[in-house]
Image: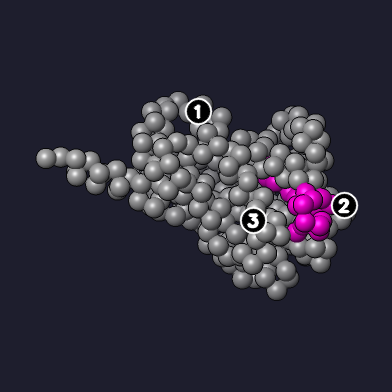
Amino acid sequence: MSRTPTGRRRFEGCSVVVTGAAGGLGRADCLALASEGAHVWAADIDMTAAEALIPELAAAGGSGQSVHLDVADADSWGALAGEVEAAGPLHGLVNNAGVSLRAGIADTTVEQWQRIMDINLSSVFYGLKMLTPALTRGARDGGAAVVNVSSIAGMVGYFSATYGTSKWGVRGLSKVGALELAALGIRVNSLHPGLTATPLLHQAPDTSFVDESVRSVPAGRLATPQEIARVVAFLLSDDATYITGEEVVVDGGLTSGGLYHRILAGLEEKP
């Protein structure tokens, strides 16, 4: 994607759409990209929060514009695609928007299932489908890439019927996208963050599970949104031109066996 000489900002002259832009991870993604010169389409259902982000993007060294997007609505995606195509080539898409629900199969309603699937999974399909024309122009204009934000819940079994299933779906759809769009010069990868210190995590009614989970992370702490955002920027950049169809896990070692390592270590300590 980068079209600048070595030592210059990687996204100078590039345009990137970020969904869920006003949230914890989305905001960090937007700022990281803007700091390297990107023009960011800050897409969010909360226009007030998205608009408040624009001055921050300018202060970071880039530019941006807020745009209303209900990621669960195909027509809303169509409107966004029209705006983006009219503006010029698109060099990057970050399908970041998502919601969570901690409930098993028996406790999940049909309505909850559909809502989570629409926001977490259908949105990724809509983005890939409707922004491919603009991304194709971007590929001809220096390069184009997509990062679909999944989760470590898309790498292992998880206790949420809706969230876990939707994130596995994002992983699979990213593989399909990588295969289909490679001929157009568009790279597609899925990103799988672990526990991250976002405002949403700390606003949960019961955060005791966070403290318990952190003890299972080999790195011994939560990720920061900025650490995740730096990986997003890498995957979109020309530093990753031969990386497509991959599942990039950023979890401090948790899915490498963190929980089992802790259990086994505890057993070994016993006389």
Which residue is at the front of the view, 78 or 39?
39
Of mark 1 and mark 2, the one earlier in the sequence is 2
Residue 44: percent from left, percent from top? 70, 39
The amino acid type of the residue labelled 3 equals Leu
Q: Mark 1 — residue?
A: 202
Q: Is residue 227 left or right of residue 18?
A: left
Q: Is residue 195 above or below residue 74?
A: above
- SS under mark 2: helix
- If you read the primary sequence from the N terminus, does the residue marked by circle 1 or circle 3 appear first? 1
Q: CA distance from mark 2 to mark 3?
A: 23 Å
Magenta-span inclusion, residue 43: no
- The residue located at (79%, 51%) in the rendering is 8
Alpha-carbon span between mark 1 and mark 3: 28 Å
In the picture, measured across the screen, residue 235 lies left or right of residue 143, that is left
Question: x and y percent of residue 58 in the render?
Answer: 81, 35
* Position above or below: 56 against 170: above
Magenta stretch bounds: 1-21
Residue 7 part of the magenta-drawn span: yes
The amino acid on which the numbered mark 1 sits, given as a three-letter code, is His
User: Would you identify the image quadrant in which residue 28 lies?
Assistant: top right
Badge 1: few (under 14), some or many (20 or more) residues near its Cα, within 10 Å?
few
Locate the C terminus by quadrant.
top left
Label 3 crowd (10 A; few <14 / some 14-19 / many >=20): many
Q: Image quadrant for the N terminus?
A: bottom right
Q: Which mark is residue 235?
A: 3
Identify the secondary structure beneath mark 3. Answer: helix
Cα distance between the residues tagged 1 and 2: 38 Å
**Nearer the viewer's eye, disc 1 or disc 3?**
3
Dot 2 alpha-carbon crowd within 10 angstroms: few under 14, some 14 to 19, many 20 or more? few
Q: Identify the mark nearer the N-term, 2 or 3.
A: 2
> Disc 2 designates what residue?
87
Mark 1 residue element: helix
